[in-house]
Structures are given as structure tokens and as C-alpha cells.
């Protein structure tokens, strides 16, 4: 049976089982359950799986949410799909509530309108930190975690 599969084994989807594990002690429910199975092609890059998971699961991790708040006011460099780098300022952060809560940053490039983006899906690096740290980051993070858990 295994010999007959040949090269098909490299293109037929396999189920990748993912389980949510809270590092912050906050109880979060994934879409409908705490474990999910994702069909993926065996040769699909892990970056594609990561992008998919970011689109379909909330990001309640305290460390990540702290980072999201702390970079407000910072300057980032973002690599576009054409490979060119652009500089932008991070203007704001919010958790967009909907069917799935999403961590959304508002960025602004020189001479353009502010744009809301899912920064986790973008190839970016931090060029400079915010001039003044955001006050009460822990409180903002806790509020985001509550919003995510309540939905």
C-alpha cells in the first residue's frame, strides 16, 4: 500500500493537530474547542501554516500583547511583497472583535494615510522604540485578554 502512493504522499494533505496551551493562566477558547486539526500539504512551508493559524486563532499570549502595545509610537521597517523595504510609524493598537478577535496595528508611512494591518502577518522589524513607553501596559494587556476570552 505504501509503495503505491509514490509521489502522491508528497502532495496529499496530512492533518496537523494543534492544541492551545495558555502561558498566562488566562482561559481562552479556540474556535469551538481547545484542539484543532488543520489539513496541510507535507511540503508546505511552516511559514504558510503560521500565517494560516494567525488568521484563524486569537493571540492571547501576554508577551505578544505586551509587544503590541509597547511598539505604539515606534518606527518599523516592513518588507513588501516586491522585496523593497518601507519605513512606517506604529500609530495605534487594538484588538478587533468579530467572529475571531484580531490584534490590529495602525501604521502610517510618510505621506500616506494611516492603514490598519495585522502586523503579525507582515515581514517587519523594529527600527526604533517608542519615545515614551505606554503607561499601564499590564492593564491594557489584561483588558485585551479579557476581550479575547469573552469574544
Image (cartoon, rainbow, N blue to C red):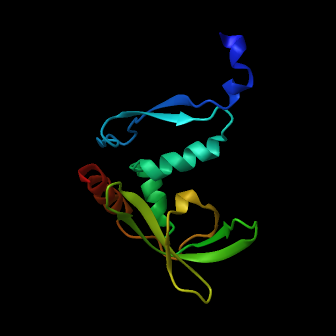
Is residue 51 toward the left or the right of residue 9 in the image? left
Quadrant containing the C terminus is bottom left
Picture coordinates of residue 35, whole percent (x, y): 38, 32
Q: Residue furthest top?
A: 1
Relative vertical location of residue 50 with respect to residue 129 in this rendering, above or below = above
Q: Residue furthest bottom?
A: 111
Q: How many marks?
A: 0
Picture residue at 66% right of the left edge, 70% below the top: 77
Picture residue at 76% right of the left edge, 66% below the top: 83
Relative vertical location of residue 135 with respect to residue 150 in this rendering, above or below = below
Is residue 103 toward the left or the right of residue 74 in the image? left
Q: Nearer the viewer, residue 6 or 82?
A: 6
Picture coordinates of residue 116, whole percent (x, y): 47, 72
Q: Residue furthest front?
A: 4
Q: Residue furthest left?
A: 150
Picture coordinates of residue 44, whole percent (x, y): 66, 39
Residue 79 in view, yes or no: yes
Picture coordinates of residue 29, whole percent (x, y): 30, 41
Relative vertical location of residue 39 with respect to residue 110 in this rendering, above or below = above
Relative vertical location of residue 88 with respect to residue 47 in this rendering, above or below = below
Q: Nearer the viewer, residue 56 or 73?
A: 56
Asked which quadrant contains residue 129, the reply is bottom right
Asked which quadrant contains residue 25, the reply is top left
Amino acid at each position: 500500500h505504501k509503495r503505491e502512493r509514490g509521489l502522491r504522499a508528497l502532495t496529499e494533505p496530512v492533518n496537523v493537530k494543534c492544541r492551545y496551551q495558555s502561558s498566562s493562566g488566562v482561559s481562552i477558547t479556540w474556535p469551538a474547542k481547545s484542539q484543532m486539526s488543520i489539513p496541510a500539504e507535507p511540503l508546505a512551508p511552516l511559514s504558510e501554516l503560521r500565517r494560516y493559524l494567525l488568521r484563524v486563532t486569537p493571540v492571547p499570549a501576554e508577551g505578544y500583547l505586551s509587544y503590541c502595545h509597547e511598539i505604539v509610537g515606534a518606527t518599523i521597517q516592513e518588507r513588501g511583497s516586491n522585496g523593497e523595504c518601507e519605513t512606517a510609524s506604529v500609530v495605534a493598537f487594538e484588538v478587533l472583535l468579530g467572529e475571531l478577535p484580531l490584534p490590529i496595528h495602525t501604521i502610517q508611512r510618510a505621506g500616506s494615510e494611516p492603514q490598519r494591518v495585522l502586523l503579525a502577518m507582515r515581514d517587519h522589524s523594529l527600527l526604533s522604540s517608542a519615545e515614551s513607553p505606554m503607561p499601564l501596559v499590564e492593564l491594557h494587556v489584561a483588558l485585551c485578554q479579557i476581550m479575547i476570552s469573552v469574544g
